[in-house]
Amino acid sequence: MAKLYYLPEPYPDELIGSILVRAGRHLGHPIKRMHQLLGGTPKSHWALLFQNQLHPIAAALAMPAEELLFRHTPFPYVTAFLSPEQTLRLATYYCHFPQLKASALSQSATTGGAIARYCEECIEDDHRKFGEDYWHRRHNLPFVTRCWKHGSLLKMTDRRRVGVAVTGLPHEQQGTTVVPVFEEYIHSLLEPISIELLDSTFRQPPEAWQSGYRNISMQRDFPQQGNLLSAIALCAGFVAFYGKAQLKRAGLDVPDRPNPWPVSLLRLNETSNVSAKHILMQAYLKFAPVPDAVATTPPGPQPLNCQQKDAVFARAIRKRVSMLATGTRITVTQLLSQLEILQPVRHHRNALPLTAAAIAEFRQTEFSERQAGRRPRKKYLSSKKS
Ligand SMILES: [Zn+2]
C-alpha cells in the first residue's frame, strides 16, 4: 500500500482535519485518495476534531503522536476533568492503539455545540501571514460563538452535514452567522473558560472538583438543608440562570427528577467528566445570583400571569418591530425597555415561550443590533442579593 510521506507543517492552533484538507490541496489528491494513503476507510470528508489514524499522520508530520494530539485536537479540553492518570492513559491508548476509535472523544468535544466554525477576519489575517487559511481549534469549542482574537461572531458551516466534518477550507464556505444558544452575556462568561482548558495542564481527581464546587457554594451562602447544600435550590437556580429550553438545545437538558446532572457534579460517588457540564457549573457558581432558599415560587418582584401575558407581550413586540423605521438599530434590551416589559420578561423568561419566539424573530431582522464584545454587566456579577 502506498504511504503518505508529505503533510504540511501545522499552523498554530490548527485542527487535525484542517492539516489534512490542506495536505490534499497541496498534493492535488482528492479526499478519498488521502484517506486511502493514511490507511483509513475512503470517505469524502474529513472529521475536523479527531482522526482515527493518528500514527500515520504523526509519522508524516515527523511529530510525536502525543504532540499532535495535545496541540492539534481538542484533547486537552476533552480530558480537562479527568484525573492525571486517566488523561495519560487515554492519550497513550489513543496514540498507540489504532483500534481505539475517536468517536467517543469527538462526542465529548462537541457536547454543547457541534458545527464547524470559522472567523472571517482570521481568514484574512491567515492569508496575509501564511498565504492560506485554516480551521482553528479555538473557534471550534463548545459555547464559543465569538472569535477570541477579533471579538466578532463566528460563521458556521451548513447544519445538514453530520458532526463536525469538512471538505474544504474556511474561505470556501458559504457560512451563516452562529446563533448563540444562551444569551450573549452568558456566552461571554463561558467562552474564556472553554478556551483556557486548551492550554491547561492542570488535572485533579473528580472528588477534588466536587469538593471545590461545594466550597464555593458554601462561601457564597447558597441555601442549605441541614448541614448540606440544598440540591433543589442549587438546581433551580442553575436552570433559571441558563434557561431550561437553552440547556436542552445545548444537549444538556436538566430533567425534572431527583438528582439531575448539576447535582451529581457536587456529590461524592456520583460524577461526570463531561467538560461542558463543568464549564456551566463553574460559570454558574461564580457569576449567578445566590438562589432562593425555597424554590417553589419563581424569582422576581411581582407575580405574573405568564400564560395570559405571554401572548400580549409577543404581540406588542411584533407590533413595535413592524413600526420601526428603516435603518433603525436597537438591542433586545432597548426594545423591551421601550415597551416597558424588560423586567417581567427577564424574570419570567422561561415561562414566556411566545415572547421568546417574538424576540428570536426580532433578532433575525435588520433592526437587531448585535453588540460586539459585550461584557457581562455588573448586575450579573454580584455575588450577593441586594
Ligand atoms: Zn478572528
Image (tube, rainbow, N blue to C red):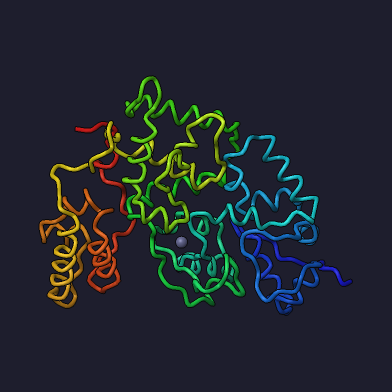
Q: In the figure, is residue 13 to the left or right of 369?
A: right
- For the N terminus, the quadrant is bottom right
Image vertical order of residue 362 relative to residue 300, above or below: below
Where in the figure is residue 100, as x and y percent of width and height? Answer: 75, 54
Where in the figure is residue 383, as x and y percent of width and height? Answer: 29, 33
Toward the viewer: 16 or 350?
A: 350
Which residue is situated farthest in the front direction here? Answer: 257
Number of labels in the image equals 0
Image vertical order of residue 195 relative to residue 312, above or below: above
Where in the figure is residue 79, as x and y percent of width and height? Answer: 61, 44
Q: Which of the 4 quarters of the picture holds residue 20?
A: bottom right
Image vertical order of residue 386 relative to residue 352, above or below: above
Which residue is situated farthest in the right direction here? Answer: 1
Residue at 55%, 60% in the rendered image? 136
Residue at 50%, 74% in the rendered image? 158
Residue at 54%, 56% in the rendered image? 110
- For the C terminus, the quadrant is top left
Where in the figure is residue 381, as x and y percent of width and height? Answer: 29, 39
Q: Which of the 4 quarters of the picture holds residue 47?
A: bottom right
Q: In the figure, is residue 333 to the left or right of 165?
A: left
Which residue is situated farthest in the top direction here? Answer: 227
Toward the viewer: 217 or 88?
A: 217
Q: In the figure, is residue 354 to the left or right of 60?
A: left
Residue at 69%, 56% in the rendered image? 102
